[in-house]
Every structure is written in C-alpha cells, then in structure tokens.
Amino acid sequence: MESRYGKYAEGAVQKAAKLGADMAEAYIGNSKELVVDVRNGSIETMKLAEDRGMGIRVFAGGKTGFAFTTDFGDSALEEVARQALANASCAEPDPLRTLPVPAPSYPQMDLFDPGIKNAAVEQKIEMAKSMENEARAFDKRISVIESSTYQDGEVEVTLFNSKGTSLHYLGAYCGMYIALVAGQGEDSQTGFALGYGLRFAELDPSKFGRQAAERAVRMLGAKPGATQKAPVILDPYVATGFLGMLAPALSAEAVQKGRSLFAGKVGQQVGSGNINLVDDGTLKDGISSAPFDGEGVPTSRTVLIEGGVLKCFLHNTYTAAKDKVLSTGNGVRGSFKGTPEVGTTNFFIEPGAKKPEEIIGEINNGFYVTEVMGMHTANPISGDFSVGASGLWIENGKPARPVRGMAIAGNITDLLKSVDAVGSDLQFFGGKGAPTIRVSAMSISGH
C-alpha cells in the first residue's frame, strides 16, 4: 500500500538539501485513538483523538538538527527544514551521527486488522459494559468499578531519507482494562485486568471482568505476614514490572554513558540458566511489532540474555556506529515530535516448561506476589530495589491466605541469578511480557 504522505516527506527532504543539508530524513506519524470509559452501565467518557505531523532531521557539516511541524503546506515544510538546519548550527559536530541506507529486505507483517475499524462504536461500548457486568456478577462483594475501558488505535508511519530509504506501514491495536474494588465489612481490596493486542476477535471482555473480580475477592481479609527469608513467586504482571528496570540497563546508550549495571558484562552470567530475555520487533501479533524502527532500520529479534548469559545490548544507528556493530533496529520514536532513541519493542522473558500450578505446588512455605508498590523508586543503575508487596501466602503447595503490607528487597541481578523456575504462561502487558517466575529465596519484611 502506498503512503498518502510520501510526497510530503520526499518534498521536505528535497527542501532541506536545497537549503544546504548534507543528509536529511523526514518521519511522518499519523495516529488515531478511541477510548471508551463505562461506569455503572453507562458511558462516562468517550474520547477520539488524532495526531499527525512530521519530524525532520538534518545533517550539515557533521552537526545534526531536528524540528517538527503539523502543517504540510509548502511554505511550512520549507520553514521546518530551515529550523532544523538552524538547530544543527548550534550543535556539537559528531561524525558518528548518520542515516541508515535502505536494507535489502524488511520483515513482512500483518499489523492491521480491519475488524478493529469495522466494528461499530456501539459494539465497543457493549464490550466495556459486559466486562463490568461480568465482574459484578462474579461476586456480590464487588462494590466499586473504578473503570471499565475499551481502547483502540491506528498508526501510520511514513519515512523518507536522502540515502534512498522510502518506507511506510499501517498498524492498529485494541485492548481493554478494568479496575475495581471488593469490600467486606471494613476491608476493601483492589483488582484489575488488562489485555492489548492486534486482533479484535481475540478480545474477551468476560474473561477480563472475571479475572479482575477474582483478584480483588481473593485478597479480602489480607494481613501482614512474618519477616523471613523464603521462596518468592512473581506472577506475570509483577515479573513484567521488574522488566521495566532491566530495559534501560540493556540499552547501548545507557552502557556508553556509564549508566548501566550490565556495562562490561557481555559474555558473563547475569542470571540463572532458566533466564532467556528477548527483544523482538518482528514478533507475530506483538503490540510493538513493526517492519522497521524510527529511523528505517529493519526490526529484528535480539536475544539479550541466553541461559543467563548476557549476549549483547540494544542499538540504534548512532550507538551502533560508536560500538562498531550493526543497529538492532531499536531506534524507537515516541512520536514525530522526537528523534529515534534506543528503546525496546516487544521485550519479554521466554516461557519455560512448567505450569504455574506446578511452580506453586513445589513450595512448602513461600510468597506468591500479585502486586508490588513503589517500583518507580528502584534504582536502574545499581539494580537495588525495595518495594511493597501483597499477594498470597503458599503453604504445602497451595495458596493458604492473602497477605499485604509486606516488602521485598534486593538487587535485580541477585534476583535473576536466583530464578529456579520459569512458567509456560507468558503474558504481555503492552510491549513487555513475562511468565510466572520463581525466585529460590528472598528477604521478605512483614511485621
């Protein structure tokens, strides 16, 4: 499919060249988003947003400049090219900054499900309502539904550069989110569920409603447990939260700036043999999949940690030039308003062979963590963390009672090295995902 915007991108690059740029790149992003919030069976908010614009990067005399515009008129494109060149003139020269050449091929992907667009808004509202109804029907102790939300979006990207790259793709995603409260006497507990993907037919509002309700109800009556050292099982959502700490540390940019706990450790054991950590921009049906990254490099599958051994880091064109390696296709852009920084695509721990029930069943006394608080306070440079935790206490291989007001602390590398079981239940929460994970022993603080 041809891009509607190709001529604007090409025009802007030509204008930049006429104005004196040695190289130039135009990146056009056009995104639409629908959000429907339902509360107590009626629509609380409905939002339809659209964002469209072009970012232009220019290179002149070894210096780089960037500017963006939302106006595609002829004079506006000339103005934005001028602005980018003016910004370049203030920059420090850096010969390693360059643009990628076109690749021989790009991954073929099916990222656009017409079912998302074709479904009537009424149907999407009904899905949010049915998710809420299912949660209420699950247990009469479900007292408050904080939000029951349906969301979808479309993104179209067009990229053109002076080295002959001319690329375009169209993608769409959809998802649902529910947050609720269960109450009994003075006690109230929260529960949530969410799921995002590329296929409209795969959304299951009833499942999310039941899942959120079950999570809240099982926590009723939770009390703090005793301080001890014991095995800890992280459910997929919590394990994915810890990945948020690992992602910045695995970017070559962080390593080059001396801000990564993995600097200098390629080839070393940084986790247990059960840990395989992958970033895959080509993952089938991955919400962060795309044929190329924010600067036109084909996306790829990068194994970062294999059998616990650190293999490599994530690169964009610039960090790759610095390390004399190839870009891994991780020049990620938040939107047309920014330049390509090193970022993750579909970033996940590969599933193992064990069912979560088996992982729990092998524990005589341990803590199954279903929620952590304060993950943002963890230090991604040292890897130290101390977070509040709640979940279920395991006795003789079965959940015995809900616990809250606990804390778990440690270092992310010690945690990775102590993983003694990885579940088969890989779940994605947006662009990051993990299965159930068991850590052989952790310091748990209670009362």
Image (tube, rainbow, N blue to C red):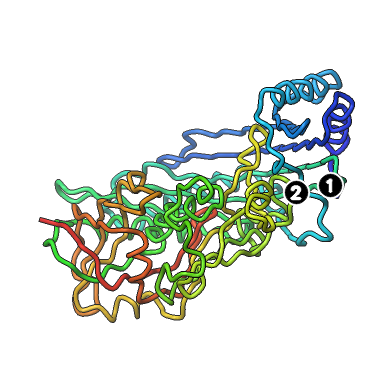
The residue nearer to you, when weighing 101 against 92, is: 92
Tell me, yes or no, whether the two marked residues, 2 and 1, touch with CB atoms within 8 Å: yes
Choose between 14 and 133: the one closer to the eye: 14
The answer to which image quadrant residue 417 occupies is: bottom left
Query: Residue 90: which quarter of the image?
Result: top right
350 w.r.t. 175: above or below: below
Q: Residues within 10 Å of mark 2 (few under 14, many from 20)?
A: many
Q: Which label was assigned to residue 165?
A: 1
Q: Is residue 81 left or right of residue 308?
A: right
* In the foreground, 291 or 43: 291
**Residue at (51, 60) in percent of width and height:** 428
Q: CA distance from mark 2 to mark 1?
A: 7 Å
Residue shown at 56%/63% (left/top)? 312
> Could you say where residue 199 lies in the image, as x and y percent from the top left?
64, 58
Residue 139 vs residue 109: left or right? left
Q: Quadrant of residue 324?
A: bottom right
**In the picture shown, does residue 12 fall above or below 106?**
above
Q: Earlier in the sequence, mark 2 or mark 1?
A: 1
Q: Along the horizontal axis of the image, is 360 left or right of 303?
A: left
Q: Quadrant of the C terminus?
A: bottom left
Spot occupied by residue 208 in the image (x, y as percentages of width and height): 45, 57
Q: Amino acid at mark 1?
A: Thr
Label drawn at residue 296: 2
**Residue 310 position within the rendered picture, expressed as x and y whole percent measured from the top left:** 50, 67
Amino acid on which the number 2 mark rests in the picture: Gly
At a point 49% along the width and 36% down the height, the residue shown is 43
